[in-house]
Image (cartoon, rainbow, N blue to C red):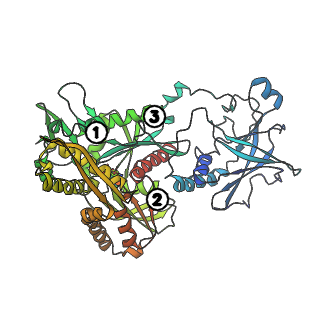
Amino acid sequence: MSSAKTTRRHPRFSTPWAVRLRAPDWADALQLATGNISRGGLFVRCEQPIPVGTRLQVVLSLPEEMTLTVEGEVVHAISPERARAEGMAPGIGIRFDESAAIDLNLLEGMAASNSAGQYAAPIAEDQYLSWSAVLADGAGSEHTTTAYKLLETPAIAPGEQADGDAELTFAPDEPTPPDASKTRDLSREPIFGIDFGTTFTSIAVVERGRVRVLAEGNQTSLPSVVCYPDEGPPLVGWPAREQIAHQPSTTIISPKRLIGRRFRDPGLATYLASSPVRFLEGPAGQVLLEVYGEQLSVEQVGAEIFQRVASIGEAASMCPVRRVVLSAPVSYTDERQALRRSAELAGLEVVGFIDEPVSAALAFGMNVERGATVAVYDFGGGTFDFTLLKMTGHGTCEVIGEAGDPWLGGDDFDHAIACHAAEQFRDRHGVDLRERKVEWQRLLFAAQNAKRKLSVEKSVELQVRAILLSLRGPIDLYLLLDRELLGELCGKLVERSFAAVELCLELAELTPAQIDHVVLTGGTSRSPLVRARAQQFFGKEITVNYDPELGVVSGNALFGQILRSR
Ligand SMILES: Nc1ncnc2c1ncn2[C@@H]1O[C@H](COP(=O)(O)OP(=O)(O)OP(=O)(O)O)[C@@H](O)[C@H]1O
Ligand SMILES: [Mg+2]
């Protein structure tokens, strides 16, 4: 990024004043840049009166030793006397020159791509965005102070001088409560990103320049499960998941597998036949399911999940969730329309769709050179997708290859571990837990927990207390699982994913060495097995976010923010 400008819009000024700000990391820089501070500006606290109309340079020190210098003007001044009388902060409001907009937009793009993977902690409503700053006057003296981002656009026409403070809504000492009437103005409402995953669904939004994944309690993901009890409203998410073993015929898991698919789709035959839920063919050839004699579309089931995740988003963000960005695997065609209908049934407006790998790339900060080839390896709970992207400049890219396995995911790891434990248990106690629905479900949950722990620890104890009741008392299940055993049980699943990777590379006529950046996403890519194999296969540094299952939802939220600011 160029720092010094050679052509200035106001050459007559020798910039006697300067404000220097430091954004120590990209997330900070993003907060500085988003909302385009050129439209808002900065408020710099200072005791010394500086007249309206004074020209200033604002020097932003950015990560990686970059500096951006933009120029602006004092458009508003609050003297210390007035500040004391009115309970405000003394200081000056600075509006940037219009010519700064391009640089600030570039900064915004660069900062967004560099900091997106950092999930922000919730910021309290009364917390203003502020940075420590240095204010230097022309005489050479410097004062350490604080600069705040202006919350609103000052309603001042270019060239016009502000005389009152009605135009500026900034008041650092007295935060104004959010104006309820403004939240009804659609263009001001945030656009939320929803990742409707096969196993988990999540929601995120960009708040004050950072992606915030919205959680219920400490859960950032909602199981994509809906249970229709014989009475009362459907259960969605965690309570529905608990019913998988108890109400198998009315508990629908992974509706994403079925959405927009044809009942006669050969790829679905085994799944439909083996499911305890009763599926039937709808008049248009779609998949319907029957619950207590009533026919439901898969979209209706999905809508329950959309509605639930939207209510989680609303509660956590305190904003209505109406406009959303959704994502889908590259291979989805008709399924996208079905996903859209499902979200609409939940009362949401789908303002954008983005391919899941592109979204993951956006979230992981694809600040890579034009022409670079990026591989996104997405190993989720139910599906595996591998995508090759060619970066076409300024954060845009083109999909140049895609392969995957719609029936390969982290659930298969749980299954393989649970099968091994069940076989050992059968050899010792003569009972096959796979034939007992409730016990098998408990074992699958325990296997998933053990698998997750094993991503951090070298070995874990898989334990299910009183999994069987015998005449001699309850019998516990116990298995010592270490990474070597995990490799024996699940290594072939990882190899299946790499078979798809090899096929994709072959079709794109590329070798692993020709890939410039590798991004691992999806919860299963937390597994040490996957990471080690990817490292070995690509023979280079790979990017794994510390929350890989939240990459897509974060990218969706970022895309929502981009659409919102257009
Ligand atoms: N620490 C971990 N180690 C291994 N696997 C993990 C870990 N954490 C989560 N997983 C697995 O990641 C999977 C969920 O990942 P994710 O949320 O990305 O999937 P999804 O988006 O619902 O599915 P899909 O992308 O297939 O539609 C689950 O199988 C879960 O067990
Ligand atoms: Mg996913």
Amino acid type at circle 1 is: Ser
Q: Nearer the viewer, residue 448 or 233?
A: 448
Please give the residue where the numbered disc 2 appears in the rendered image.
396
Please give the residue where the numbered disc 1 appears in the rendered image.
342
Amino acid type at circle 3 is: Ala
Q: Is residue 494 left or right of residue 433?
A: right
Q: Which residue shows up at 59% across the image and 26% down it?
A: 177
Amino acid type at circle 2 is: Thr
Instruction: Please state the horizontal and vertical placement of residue 90, each as a whole percent of the image.
Output: 78, 33
Q: Is residue 294 above or below residue 423?
A: above
Instruction: Please state the horizontal and vertical placement of residue 387, each as a whole percent of the image.
Output: 35, 63
Instruction: Please state the horizontal and vertical placement of residue 156, each as a whole percent of the image.
Output: 69, 36
Viewer-nearest of discs 2 and 3? 3
Instruction: State the separation of the CA atoms marked 1 and 3.
Output: 23 Å
Q: Secondary structure at mark 1?
A: helix
Counting other residues with Cα less than 10 Å from the Cα at mark 1, is it few (<14), some (14-19), or many (20 or more)?
many
Q: Nearer the viewer, residue 130 or 92?
A: 130
Please give the residue where the numbered disc 3 appears in the rendered image.
316
Q: Which residue shows up at 22% across the image and 47% down it?
A: 443
Asked if marks 2 and 3 touch (Cβ < 8 Å), the reply is: no
Asked if marks 1 and 3 touch (Cβ < 8 Å), the reply is: no
Q: In the rendered image, is residue 387 in sight?
A: no
